C-alpha cells in the first residue's frame, strides 16, 4: 500500500502511512514518480529528500517505498559511462528523453541487454567467500572486470560456467553453510552510504604519479592517500583535477563533478575519448567513470553524488585495481548538506552548516586507503582528491578546516600566482605532503638517491627567496650580496623553468619522474657551479648573462623520447662554467 | 484546474497563508482578488494538507484577510513566446510595456526550464570577436560561455556591455543574432542608456528587452532573469539564433533574493544571503551553452557591481565559482583615464583555450596571451616596488618591465568605447609591445612564433 504526501516544501516532502519505512530507504514520490530518500522518521510521518524538482507535486499524491536503501548497480558496463548523482545514465537519458533532463525518469544504470563473455577462473566444488574471484569479462580494452563473490556471500560453488551472459542472467550458484542457495550474477547492488568491506588497511608507501612537477616532486600524493585542493575561483582547481584525471597512473579514474559547471563535464566527455593514456596508449575514457551532477541539477542528488562515486571506486578497488577519485567540488556537496539540513530545521553549526558536517567529511575521506581487499593478498588502493571552494578563498571556512583534519596532502592554490598566470598556482610555501618522506625508498629505487635531497634543497631556496624578498621590499635589491642575488635568480628559475607547467602544451602537460628529476638536477647544478664561481670572484652578472640559462628554460619543452637532450643540459652547464673560468683566466 | 478560496488566515510581508485548501501543488500560481476587484499574483511556496503558503509577486499593501479571494491556477509560471518578441520591451513577468499591444504567442513555456543534460551539451569553442583588445586577446569569449563583468558603482560597465552587444560577431558565415536584455532593479537612466544605444545602432530590431526598474516589485526581480533566459532558450534552440543575454545588475537580483529569504524567515548564510544562493544563481548562469545538433547558442554577460569593490563579497564570489571566468573593471585604471578600465590580471576566461589558435584566431594567440599576462604582472609588481623604494631601487630589467606595463595599458587596454579592433590588430599590438622586452625574457612563446612575428611589422 502506498503512503501519501501531506506536505511539500521545495526538495523536502513529508509523507505518512508508508509501509514499514526505514531510514535512507528509496521512495518514489507523487504521480510522476520522483526519486527520493527517507531522511527522517517521526511517528507515522516520514521526511523525504527528493532528488528532483518538486514543482507541481502536492498533498494527497502517493509515495511508494521501494524497500532498499539508496544503492548503485555494480557490474560490467560502468567504465566510460556518465551518470548523474544517483547513477542514472545521462547518455541514455539524452538519447531517449531529449537535451533537457525531465523529471521522474528511470533508466537502468548499466545495460541489461548487452551480453558479456564471462570466463570462469573458479570451479564448482571450491569453497569461496566474499571478494573471491569467480572469473572475468573484458570490460574495455584496458580494464579486465573481475567478477567477485559478493561481500556478504560465502559457501561452496555448486555451479559456474563460462559463457555469454547479460548482467541479469545466472552464471552460477553458491550453497552457504545453512544450505541456502545464492545465485551468482555479473552484477549486484550496494548501498552507497556503506563502505565496501576489505581485509585490512595498510600505510600508503608509494606515489600516485601525476606527471605534474609541483605535485610529484614537491608535494606527492601516495596511492591510497587523500589530498585536498582548496582555492578561490579562477585559481585553477578544475584544471588541476582534470590534469590528475588525465595523467595520474591509476588503473581506474572516477571523476565526480559535484555541483560544478556543465561545460566542464562536457569538456571531459569530449576530450577524454581523444586523449591517450601514456601507459597503455588507449583512450583515457576506457578507464574513466564520470559522475556529473552539475550545479543546476537537483541539490539532493548532489549530496548523494560523492557517495555514488566512491562506491563505484571501491568496487574496482576490490578487483585489485589502483583507483583514483576526484571530487570537484566538496564545498558544493557540503552546501547541499546545508540546504537540506536547513529545510529539516535542524540546529545549525558554524556558518549554517549542519553540526555533523565534519563527521560526514571524515566518513567520506576515510573510505580512501591502501588495502588488502577481500579474497586477495595483493594491495589495491583508492586515492581521493577533493577540491574545496572556500568563500573568498578564505581557509578558515568550516569545510576547509574539516577537510584539513582528514587529508594528508594539501595543495593550496593561490590567487596571486594565478593572476601572474603561474600555473599550476600551487603555493609552495604553505602546501604540504605528509607522504613525501615515507616514500623515500620508492624514489631511491625507481629514480635516484638524490631525489629527496634535491626536493629539500629546492624548497629551501624558495623559502629563502620569500625571506629575501621581504628585505628587497624594505631596502632594495642593491643591498643584497651576490650570493643572495643568485639565490633569487635560482629561485626564479625553479619557479619559471620547473614549477610552471602549461597544461595545454602538448609536451609540457605531462612530465615523467625521470625528466622531473633531471630538470631539477640541472637547475641545482647551475646553482652550485654559480656559487663556486662567485666565491672564485667572478661577477654575478657575467654568470647570469650566460646563454646556458636559456637551455635550462627550454628543458620542459623537450619530449619524453628526447630525454637525452635534458641529460645533455647538465654537460652544457659544466662546459659553460668552464668557459667563464677560462675567459676570466685569460683576461 | 482552477480552485477558489476565501479563507485567508494571515499575511506577513509578501507571504500569505490560506487555510482550508485542498490538492494545492507546490509551485503553482495563485491570483489574489482584493475587495476592490484588483488582482495580485503569487506562487505557492509550501503546501500541506489544508494549508498553502503563498508568496506574492507584489506588495501585500491593502490586502485584507477578510475580503480577499484566492484563485489557484493549477499551473506554474509560464510566459508566451514568439518571433514577434524581437524589438519589443516587456516587464518582469513578460507583459509588454511599450504600447505596441500583446504578442500572439506561438507557445507558452515554464520559466524555470529544465537543466541541460551535460551529455547533450556541445563544448563552446567558437570565437566571438568583441572588438575589445583586452577581451579578444586575453580573455577570449566563446559562444555558449557565461562571462560576467565584475564592476563597481560609478564604473562604465554599461558602456562596455553596450559596446560588446554592438560589436560582437563571429568570424565566418553570417548567422542570425539576437540580444536579450534583462534589467533588474536598475535606474531609469541606465535602462534608457541601453535602449537608446540599441536604438541608435538599429540593434533594437534584434533585441528583446525585459525591464524591472528600481521601484518595480522586488519579486519580479526574481522572475526576470528566468523569463529572459526562457525567451533566449526559445530563440536559440527553437529558432536557431545566436543569443547574447545581458543581465544587469545581478547584485540587485541577489539583494531581492535576500529580502525574500528574510521574509520567509529562513536561516541566513553569509552576510544574510540565503544558504541556497549558489544553487539559485547556478539555475540562472547554467542556462548558457550550446546543445549538440542545435544551431543556436546562448552566451551570457551578467553584470554585477561589487559592494565596496570587494570581490570576496558573496555575490561576486558565488558568481565567480559558477561562471566561466570574469572580467574585472578597476577603479585605479579608470582613474588613469583608460577605457575600458579592465584589470586583466584577476580577470579570466576559462573557455579561452578552446576558442583560440590556428583556424580560429591565429596560431600564436595562446603564447602571446600568456606572455603578455606574465610580463604585465611582472611590470605591475615592479611598479608597486618603485612606489615604495623609488625608481632607483629597480634593476634594469625591472625598469623595462615597468615601461612595458605602462605601454601595455596605454596601447593595448586603452581603446575607448567606439573603436572596433580585429583580432589580427589586437595580436599585432601585442607583438609590438613584446618588442620592449629582451628576447630572453620571452619564455612563454615558442621560438618559431618569435621568428615569424617578432621581426615583422
Image: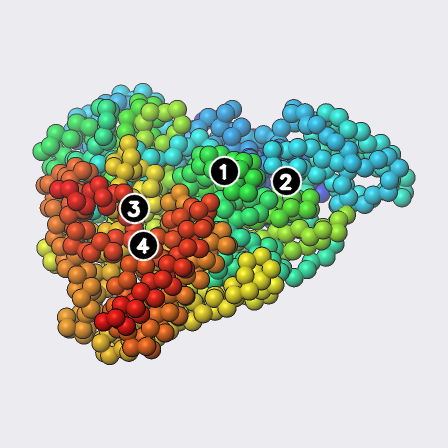
The residue located at (29%, 35%) in the rendering is B358
Q: Is residue B49 visible?
A: no
| Residue lying furthest front | A586
Q: Which residue is mark 2?
A: A72
Q: Which residue is mark 1?
A: A276
Using the rendered image, report if marks 3 and 1 lie on a common chain: no
Residue A319 lies in quadrant: top right
Q: Secondary structure at mark 1?
A: loop
Q: Secondary structure at mark 2?
A: strand
Q: Is residue A132 visible?
A: yes
Mark 2 vs mark 1: give the one in front. Answer: 1
The front one of A189 and B229 is A189
Q: Which residue is mark 4?
A: A421
Using the rendered image, report if marks 2 and 1 lie on a common chain: yes
The residue located at (12%, 29%) in the rendering is B202
Ranked by sequence position, the earlier of labels 2 and 1 is 2
Report x, y in % for residue B46: 47, 44
The front one of B455 and A309 is B455
For residue A54, above or below residue A363:
above
Marks 3/4 in contact by CB < 8 Å: the verdict is: no
Task: Using the numbered discs, state the Cα–Cα distance from disc 4 to disc 1 in whole angstroms.
Answer: 27 Å
Report x, y in % for residue A454: 47, 66
Q: Residues within 10 Å of mark 2 (few under 14, many from 20)?
A: many
The residue located at (26%, 47%) in the rendering is B369
Marks 2/1 in contact by CB < 8 Å: the verdict is: no
Quarter of the picture containing the N terminus of chain A is top right
Mark 4 vs mark 1: give the one in front. Answer: 1
Using the rendered image, report if marks 4 and 2 lie on a common chain: yes
With A327 as the anchor, is A124 left or right in this view?
Answer: right
Task: Using the numbered discs, state the Cα–Cα distance from disc 3 to disc 1 in whole angstroms.
Answer: 24 Å
Mark 4 vs mark 2: give the one in front. Answer: 4
Marks 4/2 in contact by CB < 8 Å: the verdict is: no
Amino acid at each position: 500500500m502506498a503512503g501519501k504526501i501531506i506536505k511539500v516544501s521545495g526538495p523536502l516532502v513529508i509523507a505518512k502511512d508508508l509501509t514499514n519505512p526505514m531510514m535512507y530507504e528509496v521512495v518514489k514520490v507523487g504521480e510522476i514518480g520522483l526519486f527520493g530518500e527517507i531522511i527522517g522518521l517521526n511517528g507515522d510521518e516520514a521526511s523525504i529528500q527528493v532528488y528532483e524538482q518538486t514543482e507541481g507535486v502536492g498533498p494527497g499524491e502517493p509515495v511508494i517505498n521501494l524497500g532498499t536503501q539508496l544503492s548503485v548497480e555494480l557490474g560490467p558496463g560502468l567504465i566510460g559511462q556518465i551518470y548523474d548523482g544517483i547513477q542514472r545514465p545521462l547518455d541514455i537519458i539524452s538519447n531517449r528523453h531529449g537535451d533537457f533532463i525531465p523529471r521522474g525518469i528511470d533508466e537502468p544504470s548499466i545495460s541489461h541487454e548487452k551480453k558479456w563473455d564471462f570466463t570462469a577462473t573458479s570451479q564448482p566444488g571450491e569453497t569461496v567467500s566474499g571478494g573471491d574471484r569467480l572469473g572475468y569479462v573484458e570490460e574495455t580494452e584496458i580494464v579486465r572486470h573481475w567478477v567477485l563473490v559478493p561481500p556478504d556471500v560465502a559457501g561452496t560453488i555448486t555451479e559456474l560456467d563460462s559463457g555469454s551472459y547479460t548482467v541479469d542472467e545466472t552464471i552460477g550458484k553458491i550453497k552457504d553453510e545453512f544450505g541456502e542457495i545464492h545465485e551468482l550474477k555479473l552484477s549486484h547492488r550496494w548501498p552507497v552510504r556503506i563502505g565496501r568491506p576489505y581485509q585490512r588497511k595498510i600505510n600508503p608507501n608509494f606515489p600516485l604519479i601525476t606527471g605534474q612537477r609541483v605535485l610529484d616532486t614537491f608535494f606527492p600524493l601516495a596511492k591510497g592517500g587523500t589530498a585536498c585542493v582548496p582555492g578561490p575561483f579562477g585559481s585553477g582547481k578544475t584544471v588541476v583535477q582534470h590534469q590528475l584525471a588525465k595523467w595520474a597512473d591509476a588503473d581506474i579514474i572516477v571523476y565526480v563533478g559535484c555541483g560544478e559547471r556543465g561545460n566542464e563535464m562536457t569538456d571531459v566527455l569530449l576530450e577524454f575519448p581523444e586523449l591517450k593514456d601514456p601507459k597503455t596508449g588507449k583512450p583515457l575514457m576506457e578507464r574513466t567513470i564520470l559522475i556529473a551532477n552539475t550545479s543546476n541539477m537537483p541539490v539532493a542528488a548532489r549530496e548523494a553524488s560523492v557517495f555514488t562515486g566512491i562506491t563505484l571506486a571501491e568496487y574496482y578497488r576490490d578487483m585489485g585495481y589502483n583507483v583514483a577519485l576526484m571530487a570537484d567540488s566538496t564545498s558544493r556537496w557540503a552546501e547541499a548538506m546545508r540546504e537540506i539540513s536547513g529545510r529539516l530545521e535542524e540546529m545549525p553549526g558554524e556558518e549554517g552548516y549542519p553540526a555533523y558536517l565534519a563527521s560526514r567529511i571524515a566518513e567520506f575521506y576515510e573510505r580512501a586507503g591502501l588495502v588488502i581487499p577481500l579474497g586477495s593478498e595483493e594491495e589495491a588502493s583508492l586515492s581521493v582528491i577533493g577540491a574545496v571552494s572556500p568563500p573568498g578563498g578564505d581557509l578558515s571556512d568550516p569545510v576547509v578546516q574539516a577537510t584539513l583534519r582528514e587529508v594528508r596532502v594539501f595543495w593550496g592554490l593561490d590567487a596571486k600566482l594565478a593572476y601572474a598566470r603561474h600555473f599550476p598556482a600551487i603555493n609552495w610555501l604553505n602546501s604540504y605532503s605528509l607522504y613525501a618522506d615515507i616514500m623515500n625508498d620508492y624514489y631511491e629505487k625507481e629514480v635516484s638517491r638524490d631525489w629527496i635531497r634535491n626536493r629539500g634543497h629546492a624548497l629551501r631556496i624558495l623559502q629563502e627567496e620569500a625571506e629575501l624578498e621581504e628585505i628587497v621590499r624594505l631596502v632594495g635589491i642593491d643591498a643584497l650580496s651576490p650570493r643572495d642575488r643568485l639565490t633569487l635568480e635560482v629561485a626564479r628559475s625553479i619557479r619559471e623553468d620547473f614549477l610552471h607547467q602549461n597544461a595545454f602544451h602538448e609536451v609540457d602537460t605531462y612530465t615523467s619522474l625521470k625528466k622531473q628529476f633531471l630538470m631539477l638536477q640541472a637547475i641545482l647544478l647551475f646553482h652550485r657551479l654559480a656559487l663556486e664561481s662567485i666565491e672564485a670572484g667572478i661577477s654575478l652578472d657575467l654568470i647570469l648573462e650566460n646563454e646556458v640559462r636559456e637551455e635550462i628554460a627550454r628543458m620542459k619543452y623537450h619530449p619524453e623520447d628526447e630525454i637525452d637532450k635534458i641529460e645533455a643540459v647538465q654537460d652544457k652547464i659544466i662546459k659553460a662554467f668552464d668557459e667563464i673560468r677560462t675567459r676570466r683566466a685569460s683576461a | 484546474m482552477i480552485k477558489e478560496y476565501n479563507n485567508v488566515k494571515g499575511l506577513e510581508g509578501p507571504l500569505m497563508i490560506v487555510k482550508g485548501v485542498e490538492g494545492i501543488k507546490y509551485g503553482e500560481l495563485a491570483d489574489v482578488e482584493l475587495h476592490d476587484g484588483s488582482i495580485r499574483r503569487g506562487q505557492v511556496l509550501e503546501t500541506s494538507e489544508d494549508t498553502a503558503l503563498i508568496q506574492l509577486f507584489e506588495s501585500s499593501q491593502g490586502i485584507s484577510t477578510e475580503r480577499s479571494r484566492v484563485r489557484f491556477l493549477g499551473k506554474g509560471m509560464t510566459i508566451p513566446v514568439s518571433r514577434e518578441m524581437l524589438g519589443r520591451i516587456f516587464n518582469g513577468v513578460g507583459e509588454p510595456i511599450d504600447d505596441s499591444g500583446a504578442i500572439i504567442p506561438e507557445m507558452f513555456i515554464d520559466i524555470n526550464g529544465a537543466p541541460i543534460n551535460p551529455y547533450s551539451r556541445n563544448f563552446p569553442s567558437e570565437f566571438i570577436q568583441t572588438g575589445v583588445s583586452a577581451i579578444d586577446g586575453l580573455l577570449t569569449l566563446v559562444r555558449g560561455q557565461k562571462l560576467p563583468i565584475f564592476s563597481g558603482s560609478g564604473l562604465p560597465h554599461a558602456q562596455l556591455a553596450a559596446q560588446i552587444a554592438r560589436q560582437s560577431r563571429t568570424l565566418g558565415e553570417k548567422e542570425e543574432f539576437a540580444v536579450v536584455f534583462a534589467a533588474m532593479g536598475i535606474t531609469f537612466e541606465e535602462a534608457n542608456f541601453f535602449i537608446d544605444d540599441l536604438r541608435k545602432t538599429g540593434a533594437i530590431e534584434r533585441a528583446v528587452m525585459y525591464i524591472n526598474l528600481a521601484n518595480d516589485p522586488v519579486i519580479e526581480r526574481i522572475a526576470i532573469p528566468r523569463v529572459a533566459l526562457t525567451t533566449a532558450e526559445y530563440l536559440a534552440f527553437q529558432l536557431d539564433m545566436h543569443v547574447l543575454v545581458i543581465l544587469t545588475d545581478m547584485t540587485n537580483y541577489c539583494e531581492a533574493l535576500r529580502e525574500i529569504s528574510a521574509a520567509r524567515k529562513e536561516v541566513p548564510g553569509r552576510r544574510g544571503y540565503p544558504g541556497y544562493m549558489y544553487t539559485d544563481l547556478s539555475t540562472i548562469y547554467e542556462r548558457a551553452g550550446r546543445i549538440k545538433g542545435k544551431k543556436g547558442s546562448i552566451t551570457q554577460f551578467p553584470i554585477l557591481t561589487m559592494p565596496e569593490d570587494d570581490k570576496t563579497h558573496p555575490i561576486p564570489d558565488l558568481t565567480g565559482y559558477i561562471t566561466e571566468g570574469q572580467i574585472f573593471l578597476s577603479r585605479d585604471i579608470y582613474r588613469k583615464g583608460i577605457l575600458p578600465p579592465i584589470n586583466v590580471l584577476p580577470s579570466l576566461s576559462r573557455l579561452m583555450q578552446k576558442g583560440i589558435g590556428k583556424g580560429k584566431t591565429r596560431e600564436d594567440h595562446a603564447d602571446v596571451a600568456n606572455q603578455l599576462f606574465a610580463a604585465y604582472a611582472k611590470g605591475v609588481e615592479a611598479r608597486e616596488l618603485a612606489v615604495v623604494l623609488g625608481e632607483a631601487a629597480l634593476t634594469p630589467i625591472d625598469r623595462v618591465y615597468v615601461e612595458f606595463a605602462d605601454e601595455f595599458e596605454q596601447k593595448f587596454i586603452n581603446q575607448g568605447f567606439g573603436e572596433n579592433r580585429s583580432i589580427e590588430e589586437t595580436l599585432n599590438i601585442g607583438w609590438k609591445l613584446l618588442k620592449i622586452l629582451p628576447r630572453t625574457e620571452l619564455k612563454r612563446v615558442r621560438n618559431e612564433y618569435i621568428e615569424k612575428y617578432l621581426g615583422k611589422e
